[in-house]
Every structure is written in C-alpha cells, then in structure tokens.
Image (cartoon, grey):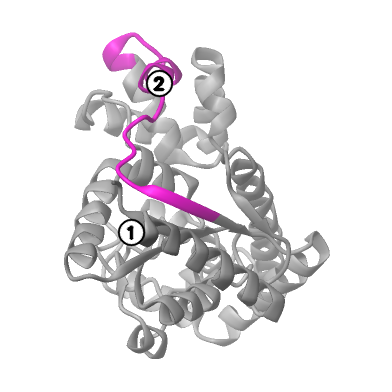
Amino acid sequence: MRPRLIALVGPTAGGKTSLAIGLARAIDAEIVSIDSRQVYRYLDVGTAKPDHAARALVRHHLLDVVDPDVTLDAARFAALGRAAIADALARGVRVVLCGGSGLYLRALTEGLCPAPPADPEVRARLHAIAQAQGAVALHAMLERLDPTAARRIEPRDVQRTIRALEVLELTGRPLSEWQARHAFADRPYDLATFVLSPESDDLERRIAERTRAMWQGGLLEETERVLGLGFSPELPPLRAIGYREAIRHLAGELEREAAIAAMIRATRQYAKRQRTWFRGLGGARWLDAAGHDASVLQALFARSREFLDEAHLS
C-alpha cells in the first residue's frame, strides 16, 4: 500500500505556512516544503520562509538547500523531496507537503517525463537571448514553436521557458509531447491535496499587507546582503518577485513606494496564475478562507485525520 501524505497548497500569502505547522503538530508530522524559492539560502524575508521559531515547532525539509547561483531543477528537487519523505516515514513520522509551486508538487508526487538532461551550451545561448531581448521575447519564441507548453508557462518564467526550448532543440520534439506521453504516472504516494484559497478581496488585502511587512521587515537589507556576497542580480532567484523590485530601488530606478506597488501588482498576478493551475488538480479539496480561520483549521484537521485513519484501518 502506498504511503499516505497530506499536501497543503494554494496561492501565495494565503496563510499556508501557519496552517501547515498547526496541522503537522496535530498529527505528529514533519513538513516538506514545495516552494520553488525557499530552497535558496540567504533568501528569507523575500520568500516568506518559516523563521527559526516556526522550525523549532515542526521540523521542515528542503529549506536552504542551495546557494542562489545553483540551479535546482524539478528533477533534483523531486529526488531530494522523495529522500526526505522516505526518511520521515522510516522514522514513523507523517508528512505534510506545503507550498505554492505546482511544478514541484507534480514532480514530487507524479514524476517527470524522461526528457534529455540540460545542455549547458544551449542554455547559455538561450540565457543570452533572454538578457538581450527580454523574457517576454524568449517566451514568444516558445509560443511559435510549442504553443501548448507556452500556455502552461508564465511569460516571465525564464527558467521554464528555456527548458522547453532546450528540449525542442535537442530532440526535435516539443516538451508538451514528452509530457503527454509520460502522463505524469509515477505516483508513489496516496495523496490528499487541500487548496487553501481565500476570497479574492481578502487575498489581495493579505498580499498588500505582507508586501509592506516584508519591506518593513528587512527585504531591502536582505537584498543588499545577498548582492554584497557577490551574487549577480541577474540570477533567476534574484529576478523573482520582491528581489527584482528591491534591486531596482537600490539602483535608483524606482522610488520605494513605486517598488512596493510594483511588487504588490506582480504578486497578485502570480497568485492568480497559481489559482488557475491548482484548479486543474483532480480530486483536490478547496478551503475557501485564509489560514487563520478557525473553521478552516477544523475542516483540515478533521479531513486529514479521516484520510490517514483510513490507511491505518485498511
């Protein structure tokens, strides 16, 4: 029988972290992060990474895995995640997956198609195009060559756009075709997935409040420290929402309030894309409130225990 896991996913700023910690404590579980940015060291404030107090309450995995200049693709993430899950289960501990990356969730729980490995020369050339012409122009190339893959990739997601173009160039077959043949059928776990998704007005308010809290809580200073360590502002983690606005402010391109407003807009757009992606999850149970809502806590705990108890009884 496949091990049973709980997955708590949803758009950014919905309150997943605190809810997952409460759930993990209630069912004696550890948390495996499925956040695509919290894997990077030094990027704490801008990624809303659980702080030391939260980690003292519940053990977390896949935080602070690599430096910002190291590429951590979905395949490597899945391998690390499955190893962490195996370790917890071997110790008799339950596992809660928590995060907002649909790609990492799929890689971890459904596997990845056997497309060819990365080619440094091809990637370097595509990165040069992105830097010279911009991420949107690179995505337009993908739209012409593999429109199916392009529809699944956000125009400013340079890393995934490059991967799709790379696969097409190396194999002559679009990434969407590789994925369709694989059908994401590598499923080692029995998964109960809960999507935490507050009402739109509530989520927009929470995004604005959290963004301002990040700027007041050290986002700018954290960005300066990371750049001071010698990491290039062109690295993908530093081109992500929050850090790119902070870098533009530090460079004198944006006033502080304009940078905050730009970050709020970009985060709202990202949350909208996340919601769209998670709507495609078959069998997911939606929790239409923020993580601090007592009724959400009760519903999540009750359904999780029911799901886990079914495995015990069988």
Pointer 2: what residue? 175
Give the amino acid at mark 1.
Ser
- Is residue 202 depicted above or below 217 in this figure? above
Q: Can residue 34 be seen by looking at this rendering? A: no
- Is residue 240 depicted above or below 17 in this figure? above
Query: Could you say where residue 74 lies in the image, as x and y percent from the top left?
Result: 32, 43
Query: Could you say where residue 127 lies in the image, as x and y percent from the top left?
Result: 36, 36
Give the amino acid at mark 2.
Leu
* Separation of marks 2 and 1 at Cα, in angstroms: 29 Å
Please identify, in this view, whether the residue under mark 2 or under mark 1 is nearer the observer.
2
Give the residue drawn at x 36%, y 16%: 168
Local secondary structure at mark 1 = loop
Structural crowding at the residue carrying mark 1, measured as other residues with C-alpha within 10 Å and reported as few (<14), some (14–19) or many (≥20): some
For the record, the magenta segment spans 169-193
Q: Can residue 130 be seen by looking at this rendering? A: yes
Magenta-span inclusion, residue 181: yes
Pointer 1: what residue? 232
